[in-house]
Amino acid sequence: MFIRNELFANPKIVAMSDLTSHFVTAMRTCGIDQVKESSKKHLRRKLESVFGQALHICSDEKGKLFLYPDNLSITALAQSNIALTTELQSLKSLTHNNAITTAALKIRADLEQHEFPQAWPPHIAEGEENAFNFPESVTLFLQHLLAGSNGNKYRAKLHDKTLYVTCEEACSRMTAENWFEVEELRSNQEEADTRLILHALHASKTGSQAVIVTAEDTDVKIIFLAFSRNIRCGLYQKCGTKNRTRFIDITATGYKFKF
């Protein structure tokens, strides 16, 4: 309903995360208190099947998804860009105290406009389930307030490496330059053995020539054998000791035993 009644009526660019919040809120108004994570993850596929070419989905350089209706004009985009450029120039000219005041007012406005899918203030049970859903500006503010700029110093130690870090369902991609959450690696799998499959598949789809899984467990090898044909690059299991390391070619084994 939000897309039909608001997005197409007032064309603009909307973050997929905001649309997911609208979806959760709409479900709760219909009496569905708990929305499955699979429903959230398949929201893009559902939108593409329902709206087709009338709705466009794209991502920024950090992998965050956005969508906009087909009737969003170039003139509207130009006007939005002009407004943002003017706001940026204004922010650059602010003094230190004015910057603090502006940031506080911005966060206050975001909180007032944000739709919280849970009751506010939340119940204790909801807090235990990590059900809090705050605007991105609040999360970013708290991150800099608590951690300062040390995050950049530690990321610089990565040099030319890319690190993926999981925390509960979320997964973040870190480099020496930046970090961002990878939506396609979000998962509710609790066991690392099964979650490794998702990461291996993502690596093969993003240009990796080989995937090496470091594990001694036989069950890891069996799981990867079952999915070896879906991973379109060389797949190996690294095992053994520091002085006697060996690599098992899972791809070749899978073809041999017709997995």
Image: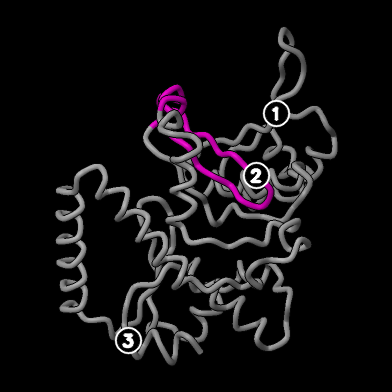
Sequence-earlier tag: 1 or 2: 2
> Label 2, on which residue?
167
Sequence-earlier tag: 3 or 1: 3
Which numbered tag is attached to residue 10? 3
Residue segment shown in magenta: 153-176
**Residue 73 versus residue 161: which sits nearer the camera?**
73
Instruction: Tell me where residue 154 appears, x and y as whole percent.
Output: 46, 25
Q: Is residue 249 visible?
A: yes
At label 2, which amino acid type do we have? Cys
**Residue farthest to the right, as pictured:** 218
Q: Residue at x 32, y 77 (%)?
A: 12
Question: What distance separates the C-alpha of mark 1 from that of mark 2?
Answer: 20 Å
> Label 1, on which residue?
214
- 246 left or right of 149 in image: right
Decide whether residue 158 is among the magenta residues: yes
Instruction: Tell me where residue 192 appears, x and y as whole percent.
Output: 75, 42
Sequence-earlier tag: 2 or 3: 3
